[in-house]
């Protein structure tokens, strides 16, 4: 079972930026997908963004397109979520996730989850 260690998050004013990082460990396969989900208070966890580790192709929820960017650094074995133009409605716990494919990751709950990082956007 993979382990996902997150860092980043915090408190920012609306319009500001934050970056989340996630490092997977225990993974030996070269083809997999990583991404981010978020859970706002009182709501379900929802898909935010995903990236294919082998191709680098990215996918986003409509609510974050044009504002968030997911990327990976193969040398550092790290995936990032750069969040710009943050809005109060982006406030949530953000989870790093991993699964075999982007389709599996984005259409159902992924099999591996990080510990979660709080992102709070004040108005």
Image: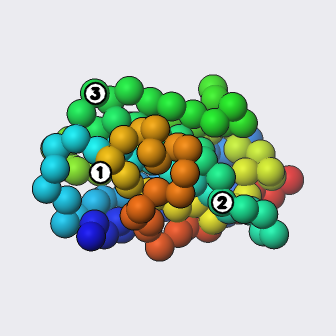
Real-space Cα separation, disc 1 to disc 2, in angstroms: 22 Å
Real-space Cα separation, disc 1 to disc 3, in angstroms: 15 Å
Badge 1 is on which residue? 78
Instruction: Give me the residue at 28% from left, 60% from top.
Output: 24
Residue 54: where, in percent of width, then height?
24, 33
Badge 3 is on which residue? 55
What secondary structure is found at the residue carrying circle 2? strand
Q: Does residue 28 appear to the left or right of 118 in the view shown?
A: left
Instruction: Give me the residue at 41% from left, 62% from top.
Output: 111
Give the mark, 1 or 3, whose residue is nearer the N terminus. Answer: 3
Give the mark, 2 or 3, whose residue is nearer the N terminus. Answer: 2
14 to 28, vertically: above or below: above
**Considering depth in this image, is 15 or 100 the residue closer to the camera?**
100
Callout 1 crowding tier (Cα within 10 Å): few <14, some 14–19, many ≥20: some
Residue 11: where, in percent of width, then height?
67, 63
Give the mark, 1 or 2, whose residue is nearer the N terminus. Answer: 2
Residue 45: where, in percent of width, then height?
66, 60
């Amino acid at each position: 079972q993979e382990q996902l260690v997150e860092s980043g998050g915090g408190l920012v004013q609306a319009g500001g930026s934050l970056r989340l990082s996630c490092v997977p460990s225990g993974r030996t396969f070269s083809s997999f997908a990583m991404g981010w989900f978020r859970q706002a208070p009182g709501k379900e966890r929802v898909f935010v963004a995903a990236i294919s580790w082998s191709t680098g192709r990215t996918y986003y929820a409509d609510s974050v397109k044009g504002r968030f960017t997911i990327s990976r650094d193969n040398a550092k074995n790290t995936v990032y979520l750069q969040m710009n133009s943050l809005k109060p409605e982006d406030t949530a716990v953000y989870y790093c996730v991993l699964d075999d494919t982007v389709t599996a990751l984005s259409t159902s709950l992924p099999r591996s989850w990080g510990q979660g990082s709080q992102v709070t956007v004040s108005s």
